[in-house]
Amino acid sequence: MAVIKIRNTGEIIKGHENVLSFLEKQGVLYEHWDISKLPDRLKEKFVLTDEEKEEILTIFKEEIEDLAARRGYKTWDVVALSDATPNLDELLKKFEQVHVHTEDEVRAITAGHGIFIIKGDKETGYFDVELEAGDVISVPEGNPHFFTLMEDRQVVAVRLFIDPSGWVAHPYEEKEEVIK
């Protein structure tokens, strides 16, 4: 289950209901998919063939189509990142810049871990959402955030898009704020 760390207070939020409640107040969708549906051979595999990516999409077809119908997503894919990913450090440098999108940024983690750092409301400030397998998050369009990997530097995630060609990170300029 996801764990939230609020940067300006150090508060840690755990437990599905607590995480769900906090993220709902911030306008961030959070769900949890049943990861036990994945065969063991895919649960900790971070270099995937195209066939294995398609298998993941097939396994979670019902969940993907349900989320897509509720939120207007039209296409999806699978991304896998690990130390075996060519130019991983360069990719992470791009991810680790605060930015916004003109559509939601959606990730359903199927293996590994990742962290979304999201700008909350004025009172909350920035907070980290540490995600693990089964966690699904949708950072709303226009909400400043960035993504990075955890210490193990491994993640597999289903990504959903309204229009992947328009899913571009736009830099976000902080105004008299500092990310703590």
Image (cartoon, rainbow, N blue to C red):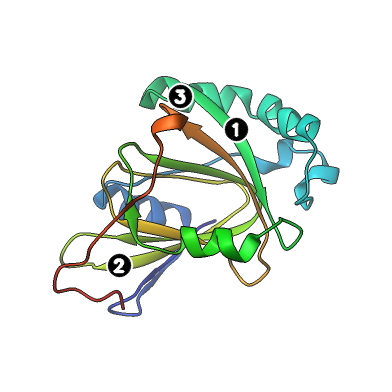
Give me the residue at 45% from left, 24% from top: 68
Q: Amino acid at mark 2?
A: Tyr
Q: Provide residue 145's location: percent of width, then percent of height.
A: 35, 57
> Cα distance, mark 3 to mark 1?
13 Å
Give the percent coordinates (x, y) of residue 146. Answer: 41, 59
Q: Name the residue beneath numbered marker 2.
A: 126
Q: Which mark is residue 77?
A: 1
Q: Which residue is mark 3?
A: 68
Q: Dot 2: few (<14), some (14–19), or many (≥20) neighbours within 10 Å?
A: many
Residue at 15% in and 64% down: 122
Q: Quadrant of residue 36?
A: top right
Which of disc 1 and disc 3 is earlier in sequence?
3
User: Is 16 left or right of 21, judged from the image as shown?
Assistant: right
Q: In this rendering, would 23 be left or right of 157?
A: left
Kind of residue indicated by mark 1 = Asp
Closer to the camera, 26 or 169?
A: 169
Residue type, mark 3 in image: Ala
Badge 1 element: strand
Q: Neighbour class for label 1 at 10 Å: few (<14), some, many (≥20)?
A: some
